[in-house]
Image (spheres, rainbow, N blue to C red):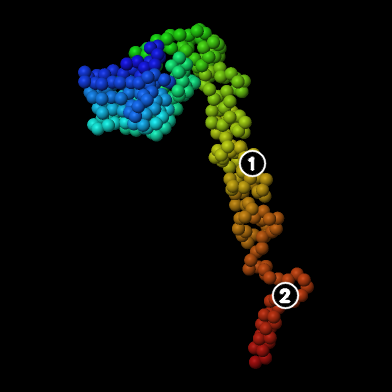
Amino acid sequence: MRCCAPTRPIAEVRCAARAASCSAGATTGSSTTRRSSRGGAIEHGGGILEAYHNNFLGNQAPLGSAVQTASDVVLHHNLLALQRGGVALKGAGSGAFLGSLNLTWLNALGDGAVPPGYLSADPQLDAYQPGAGCGVIDDFYSWYGPLVDSGDQSVSIDLDGSKPDLGAYGGPEAPTAPWETDEDGDGFPVLYDCDEGDASIYPDRDRGDGETHDEAYDGIDSDCDEGDDFDQDRDGYPRNEDCDDNNAAAYPGAPESPGGPDLNCDGLRDADGDGVDIQQDCDDNNRLIHPGVVEDPDPSVDRDCDGIGDVVRGLVPVACSVSGGTPPWAGWMLMVWILAGSVRRR
C-alpha cells in the first residue's frame, strides 16, 4: 500500500501471505496516523508482513506508534523516526519484528521491539515537520547523512545502481522524480541538492582540485554540508564560541599538551603542564614549581611562587628572634657550658 502521495511513497508495504491483514489510517503528515489505540501507521493482524524502504514519520498511537502486530513483520531499510505516543514497534501475542538495517531516531517513548542490526542516528531530513500535510512534506535527506548508501546490496539497490539508501527514496521501487530531476543542471538531483535553483550550489562542491570548498561565514551553504558555513573546522563549535575555527583540535574544553597552543579556548597557556597558567606560574618551564607546591630545603629556589626563599629546616632555627633579645636556645647553651666546666674541675 502507498500512504500519502503516490509520487512520495512513505509506507509501501507488501503482504507476503494471503492471510495477511494490512490496515492503515488516514494520511496526515509524512506517514499515516491512525486515530485509534493500536498501530499509528500500520496495524497488522496475521500472516507475514514485509516492509522495505519506507519512511515512518510522526505517527501516533498508544500501542505501536508506528507499527503494531500480532504476527511476524519483516523490516528492511526503513526509517522510523519522531513517532509520538507509545513505543514505535509493538508486538502483541506471538508477533515479532524481524529484519535488519533500519534506522530509528527520537521516537518519543523508545523504539520498542526492534531486532538486532538497527541504526540510531539523526536522519538529517531537509525540513520535515511532524504533522505537516502531505502536499508540503519535505523528507528528502542530506547527501552526507546516515541514510545514504547504508543498505545491503543483497537486499536491494538504488535506481542509480549504487548501494541502497535507507528509507522511502532508496531501492529499485523508489519514486524516480527525486533521482532524475535536476532543474539547475549542476549534475545533482533534487534528492541531494540543497538549492535546486542555483547551479553553483551542490553537494561536495569543488573547484576542479578535488577538494571541497565553501566560503566560510558568508551565509551560503555552497557545498550542501550545512554546518561548515558557520563551523569551518566541523568540531561542533561555531565561530563565536571557537577560539580557532580552522583547527578542529581547538574548542572549549579541549585537552592541551604542555608547551602547546591554547586549545581549550580559556585564553591561557600552561607550558609545563602543571595546571597553572603562565600568568600565575613563576616558572612555567618547570612543572614542580607553581603556587601551592610544598617547599623543599633549598633556599635558592622559590617553589611555591610566594616570592620568599625557602626555609632550610634543621639549619636555620625556625623560632629565632630578630628583635635583639635573648634567643630561646641561649639557656640551653649556658647549661651545657656550666656542665662542661664542672667536669673539668674534677
Q: Is residue 307 above or below residue 245?
A: below
Residue 281, image x, y percentages: 65, 48
Q: Is residue 15 above or below residue 106?
A: above
Residue 122 marker: none
Residue 102, image x, y percentages: 35, 25
Image quarter (top left, top right, bottom left or bottom right) of the C terminus: bottom right
Of labels 2 and 1, earlier in sequence is 1
Q: Secondary structure at mark 2?
A: loop
Q: Residues within 10 Å of mark 1 (few under 14, many from 20)?
A: some
Q: Secondary structure at mark 1?
A: loop
At a point 64% along the width and 55% down the height, the residue shown is 304
* Residue 55 seen in the current view: no
Residue 297, image x, y percentages: 63, 61
- Give the quadrant of residue 178: top left
Residue under circle 1?
268
Residue under circle 2?
327
Q: Is residue 265 above or below residue 76?
A: below
Residue 204 as seen in the image, left or right of residue 65: right
Residue 183, image x, y percentages: 50, 7
Q: Amino acid at mark 1?
A: Leu
